Image (cartoon, grey):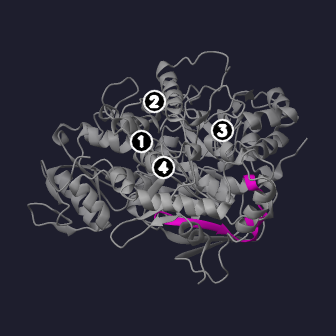
Amino acid sequence: MKPFRSHTGMVVPLDRANVDTDQIIPKQFLKRIERTGFGEFLFYDWRFQADGKPSESFVLNEPRYRGASILVTGKNFGCGSSREHAPWALADYGFRAIIAPSFADIFANNCMKNGLLPVTLPEPQVSAILERARSSERYELTVDLDGRSVSDKAGLSAPFVIDDFQRRCLMEGLDDIGLTLLHESEITAYEQRRLQMSV
Amino acid sequence: MSRTLFEKLWDAHVVTQSEAQPTLLYIDLHLVHEVTSPQAFEGLRVAERRVRRPHHTVATVDHNVPTTDRNLPIADPVGAKQIDTLRQNCRDFGIQLFDIDSADQGIVHVIGPELGLTQPGMTIVCGDSHTSTHGAFGTLAFGIGTSEVEHVLATQCLPQNKPRMMLVEVNGSLAEGVTAKDLALGIIGQIGTAGGTGYAIEYAGEAVRALSIEGRMTLCNMSIEAGARAGMIAPDEKTFAYLQGRRFAPKGEAWNKAVAYWQTLRSDSDAEFDLTVRLDASALEPHVTWGTSPGMVVPVTGCVPDPAASKNEADRLASSRALEYMALTPRTRIQDIQIDRVFIGSCTNARLEDLRAAARVVKGYRIGNAVRAMVVPGSQAVKRAAEAEGLDRIFRESGFEWREAGCSMCLGMNADTLEPSERCASTSNRNFEGRQGRGGRTHLVSPMMAAAAAITGHFIDVREWKFK
């Protein structure tokens, strides 16, 4: 996994609540058997009209937000289906961090496994960031996982909370399957205990 | 010390725990399907890892399989390749697969319980958010992403942080025509689609006890629509009666021993929850969603809400947007909404009891002239059982299509989709934009409500239905 320590990048505002994973990556793209290449299908039904032409009014298609790597959005982002294709699509498109007032559990978890950082901030701060991303050209934020804070050049500095273990995994790009396999003897011991109980 | 059902399940599966790390939980049953597994198996190959416990892993094909004639080859080459990939992976890693031509094929959350694979006291995971369904048996069951699928394949364990615990207590009794689906929608309407985020829910109370096992599965299934990864119900005599004699259920002395253990799986009377929500089942009506999120729901006697009456600006925007997508006007009576399509199916409502309830409504009637309606049984076993009772004839004679088992139009990964602007009464679980097909408009309802809408061409209060 690509480690995440600190990232500075342009912010795109997607001011919608309850964006579900069906929107992030519609089902017709779930038949692929690879992990890569989902970025071009990100928010497909919002980014493209039925005839395949880009929907100009959709925020990701506005030229001023081209190259954005931080998505700021509404509450309960990533609700619905557990499809990891959603974070794959966001990461493949070029996002490194998502800022929202809240995230759906499975989605947030899936993000962490893919070096994509979900940052939960209080609603007023998210609203302030949404507003700045709309009103200033090429608005940038720094998401500092090491220091657990989000900041901009205009004085915004917002601390955020993240689970210590997940933070370490992200910062070091750890293979968490490898970490679990370090407990091989405990897993085997557990299996033997269970086997004896059921005899 | 007194413990909740959740705590008992959790404690029994702790492999190791320490301060600085999430708890390592042992997983008893891992269900696998074609859509969220190929990348996980590929990951194993790249890292040269094996499947630790192939016998704790069971696979089927459900998400993208066609529901038309199974003797024909799959027309969609990309979908066919995904199914072939699962076959190859199951062969390579020694996993039992209930393939498309198997008599046991079906939606993963329907066949698990049906085969007796799902048993009280287990931890169960699957790369699918509706894994919460299995909680109906007193299991800790939750959906995971593909990286976690790989993790469980390789280690039979998952590192997990303990969620908080919510008790949803439903007293009173459901009226005739009001079902587990309406209860689920009513709960989501009350706590919201993120109300359960970070929680494991236990459903209890006399109305929950009174539900059949199939109804309990419907209720637990939709926990994720309230934001909760897991929902569960303490097992009881109904649970044991359902499981006894099923293929993978314990037999003989092992059965007696298992039941003795299963009987301990209930929250102690003084166990504490982080949050308790109470509902009165007697006050519940049949429910219909009007928007693009399961929380946008009202009783069938109600109207489409007016965004102007929203609590705050964010809700107003979300409602307006949903109404625009759904092409609905504020204050329209729910029963005045005309529908084009009806879908009876999905892991929420495609078990035998659901089909019986829908067939009872349909019997002796013809579907509306402008309506296209289909029934997709949850599994091949459900299909056979329904046919043995003649339910297929009732549906066919009234104009329904009778299909093969799969997820079908719940998510429209196969050819079963809505056309743009088509409006559907659906027994599935998600009314998201485009979920059943781009531009399609989904209203979530119970099987009886969907059946009645198919006949009349608009929503109707099924409590007033004239059964023939």
Disc 2 versus disc 3: distance between alpha carbons? 33 Å
Q: How far from the left and from the top, in percent, is residue B150?
A: 43, 44
Mark 2 or 1: in front is 2
The disc at residue A23 is: 1
Q: Is residue B90 visible?
A: yes
Chain identifier of the residue bearing label 3 in the image: B
Q: Do the residues labelled 1 and 3 touch (CB within 8 Å)?
A: no
Disc 1 versus disc 4: distance between alpha carbons? 10 Å
Disc 2 versus disc 1: distance between alpha carbons? 16 Å
Q: In this view, does B312 lie above or below B248?
A: below
Q: Is residue B281 visible?
A: no
Q: Say left or right for B163 vs B70.
A: left
The image quadrant that residue B146 belongs to is top left
Chain identifier of the residue bearing label 2 in the image: A
Q: Are marks 2 and 1 on the same chain?
A: yes
Instruction: Name the foreground residue: B309 vs B30.
Output: B30
Chain identifier of the residue bearing label 1 in the image: A
Q: In this view, does B304 lie above or below B405?
A: below
Mark 4 or 2: in front is 2
Range of magenta residues: B196-214
Q: Say left or right for B36 vs B455.
A: left
Instruction: Name the foreground residue: B41 vs B190.
Output: B41
Which residue is tagged 3?
A: B338
Three-letter amino acid code at the position of disc 3:
Gln
Which residue is tagged 2?
A: A31
Instruction: Name the foreground residue: B241 vs B453.
Output: B241
Three-letter amino acid code at the position of disc 1:
Gln
Q: Which residue is drawn at 74% across and 28% down?
A: B402
Chain identifier of the residue bearing label 4 in the image: A
